[in-house]
Amino acid sequence: MQSVPTVYYVALSAILFTLGVLGVLLRRNALIIFMSIELMLNSANLVFVAFAREFGQQAGQVFVFFVMTVAAAEVAVGLALIVTIFRAKRSINVDDINQLKG
Amino acid sequence: MTPTDFNAILPILVLAGYGCVLLLVDLLVPEHRKRITAWLALLGLAAAALGHVAWPAGGRLVAFGGMLVADGYALFFNLLFLGSAALTVLLAFNYLPRTGLERGEFYVLLLFTVLGMMLMGQAADLIVVFLALELLSIPLYILSGLARSRPSSEEAALKYFLLGAFSSAFLVYGIALVYGATGSTNLELVLAAANGGNPRLALLLAGVGLVLVGLGFKVAAVPFHMWTPDVYDGAPSVVTAFMSVGAKAGGFAALLRIFVVAFPDLAGQWGFVAAVIAALTMILGNFAAIAQSNIKRMLAYSSIAHAGYILMGLAAASAAGASLREFAVGAALFYLAAYTVTNLGAWAVVMAVERADSGTASTGLNLSDYAGLGWRRPGLALAMALFMLSLTGVPPTIGFVGKFYVFRAALDAGYLWLALIGVLTSLASAYYYLRIVIIMYMQEGQPVTVSRPALNFAVAVTALATFLFGILPGPLMSAATNAVMGFAR
């Protein structure tokens, strides 16, 4: 049976990662920025799984669970922060969050 | 898994268990007596420090299949983290009630972030580095938003969170690529796989670069420093004080170990990159600090600049020869300890001058608020002058000794230009550090300050350490040297 070569997965993950980076840099909605960061994390997961399959190891697949758990913890904190900001400002546009001069 | 594995994580285990229990105990502490929680937190930090007796003296204990290691290097960092956290609790003692922020969560979150930092120093596997980094960061995101309802604090928390998560994603992707290139995330196995020409060199280099970017964000190195001034400015001062020393030391603990232990064969590639980042960080941090009129923002840029000097140690650790590399890492460790002591002291003075009671027009955070401090509070002003001299790198202070060792490491490694930039930027930094001294002593003013036992004690301890280790750096230097013994092979 012919299987998909690892390099295809890695190329796909690189595309996803780049999309995530572009999303963080170009979008202005805090929620969308956050989703783009999740996309970046998941592209890393894809690399872990692809190489774990190539090496025939379980370790790489277990790492994905670690990353997913941490991402979930980040979601909990991140959404709480975004909700607090939204309550105060009625907006989660990062351009409106500009009290501190960068 | 053997019983000795648990010896290696005893301090972490103690602190983790204690933190969870403290979270519950805090529920029983009445609202107006949160000082009890603070004392209990101090006790927990002391218990974790005592946990190090389970470590083999001067030895090296590899635990959990090479995931964690207990060695002198980790011991040095663990004590640094626990010490700075204890000082932070002392600072929070008065600051939190004064600003109406006194909540038991502060102390619990502080313990958890220290837990992450200790794990950073002990991590011997890239995946553990990632987990430790998140354990360090997530409580800090919450802590920087502690003064919620104040928009600047909420904004600082969101900015720190978004950019912190962004940088973690870079780190994870970098780790994934290193795993793909070497088949492992264990630092020793990565070293073995990278040794003598890796067939997937491009993948490995991309991974190393992304790891550098991810950790560069955490230690606030240029060009990944954009978040620093805003977050340091918006977060409550006591959180900023801890963040500026703890998160930075945590980031460097992992950075130095990863690059020196796992990637010495690629030193030709990353050494130069680290040197360029160090140079940019020193230049931008110091020159941007000159333009600041708010002391929190000034210290934020100063903290960026100091990341540059420590990165100089990392760049010097790319030198050929294990003894040179060890000297460079030892110099970086000494510098981190020097910066921790001095910077915590400076922030303690900032908190003494800050006007936390709302309703007053002045926040006490402008440089002009320090006018006349030299006459009103001679002791406090003298300590602040000492901290400013130490941050500049003037003898007889610990900051001078730190800079001396880092510059020497850079020279030994053949980075003459980098050492020159370091000296020149230190000279430029004298302008804004000494400006505070001039304002304190030469300008008339009626500063309003706070004087409480815990705060004064913290200022006195840090000032004494800044001065004593400045004239007698021997014990601290030998501690740093012993910590890195056999570190680079």
Image (tube, helix red, strand yellow):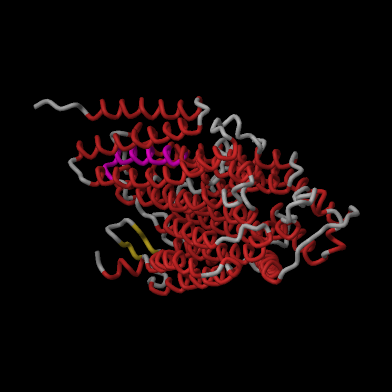
Q: Relative to B120, is A99 on the left or the right?
A: right
Left or right of residue B267, residue B343 in this image: right
Q: Quadrant of the N terminus of chain B?
A: bottom left
Asked whether the viewer can see residue B404, the reply is: no
Q: Position of residue B476 (x, y in %)?
A: 58, 66
Residue A54, percent from left and from top: 20, 36
Residue at 73 percent across and 60 percent down: it is B352
Report the magenta residues as a range: B167-184
A32 in the magenta segment = no
- Among all residues in the image, which is located at the extreme left? A1
Residue B59, quarter of picture: bottom left
Q: Is residue B92 left or right of residue B125?
A: right
Give the dominant element type of the magenta stretch: helix, strand or loop: helix
Residue B463: x and y in percent read 70, 65
Point 36% across, 66% down: residue: B8
Judge by depth and name the residue closer to the eye, B421 or B43. B43
Q: Is residue B178 found inside the magenta-colored segment of the image?
A: yes
- x and y percent of residue B398 in the render? 66, 61
Q: Quadrant of the C terminus of chain B?
A: bottom left
**Nearer to the camera, B410 or B95:** B95
At x 57%, y 49%, the residue is B144
